[in-house]
Amino acid sequence: MGSTPATEADTRSAILREAVTLFAARGYDAVSVREIVQAAGVTKPSLYYHFGSKEGVARALIEQFMSDANEMRLSVFEQTNGVRDVLETYTREMLTLALRYRNTLAFAFSIWFGRSSLKELIKHAEEYDQCVMREWVALLVERGLSGRVAEVTIKAYWALLMQELMRVVQCPEFTGCANSLADEMATLVLHGAQAFDEKDEK
């Protein structure tokens, strides 16, 4: 058990830090509230005060990542020009974020692809992803792609990106070659989009 947190903010951070480590290692359903508070050096009432329940802790972890990811995405959208620029920049920034949130992503993937009692949280994450995809399509159309090509482009890009995020989770030693990877992904996706567009025109 770690040292006792000094303030309410420290208490909240300690609970999140220890919970995500346990969730990532063993899965949400296998971890008890008692184990979380023991690892964090706090009491059960402290956890219930800050989060309401173990599910509240899980929700806070996912929302924390989503908030930072959303802020990053909006910044990338605003500061880039063209389709390739936004894809490359977003890839670099997302890989950097993934390294920071490796345990959160491991936990998120475990509930997304495995069995979990967190049905509402999964539903919320799916709705968030759909919203993000619509914003991506709108941006790519604004930057010159047709609607159908934009949809195909972002679906292909998202699949590749998820694969790389899983690599971050599965390989603790992974540091990534973000610049070369960003270039490779953008090239692959845009070549595919161009081929799809040409086929569509025939």
Image (cartoon, grey):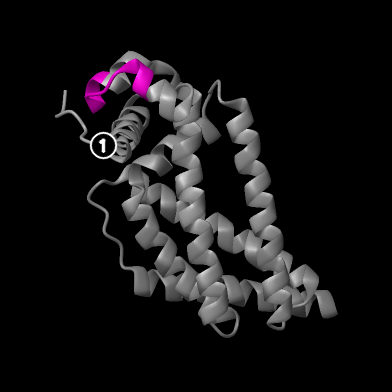
Residue 77 point in image, percent of width and height:
57, 74
Asked if residue 97 shows in the view, the reply is yes
Dot 1: within a 10 Å radius of its alpha carbon, few (fewer than 14), some, or many (20 or more) residues?
A: few
Residue 31 in view of the camera = no
State which quadrant residue 142 falls in. Answer: bottom right
Residue lying at the far front of the rendered structure: 7
Which residue type carries mark 1? Thr
Asked if the stretch drawn in magenta spans residue 200, the answer is no
Q: Where residue 68 sits in the image (x, y, percent)?
A: 46, 56
Answer left or right for 110 relative to 158: left
At mark 1, the secondary structure is: loop
Front residue of 63 and 25? 63
Q: Residue at x 21, y 33 (%)?
A: 5
Residue of label 1: 7
Residue 185 at x, y percent in the picture: 49, 69
Image quarter in which the C terminus is found: bottom right
Q: Toward the viewer: 49 or 53?
A: 49
Q: Indicate the quadrant where residue 155 lies.
A: bottom right
Q: Is residue 132 left or right of residue 151?
A: left
Question: In screen coordinates, is 141 left or right of 158?
Answer: right
Q: Residue at x 31, y 35 (%)?
A: 8
Span of residues in magenta: 38-46
Q: Mainly helix, strand or loop, the magenta region? A: helix
Q: Residue 1: where, in percent of width, then height?
A: 16, 23
The structure residue drawn at horizontal position 74% and vertical position 71%, both measured from the top left corner, is 149
Considering depth in this image, is 162 or 98 the residue closer to the camera? 98
Near-viewer residue (129 or 19): 19
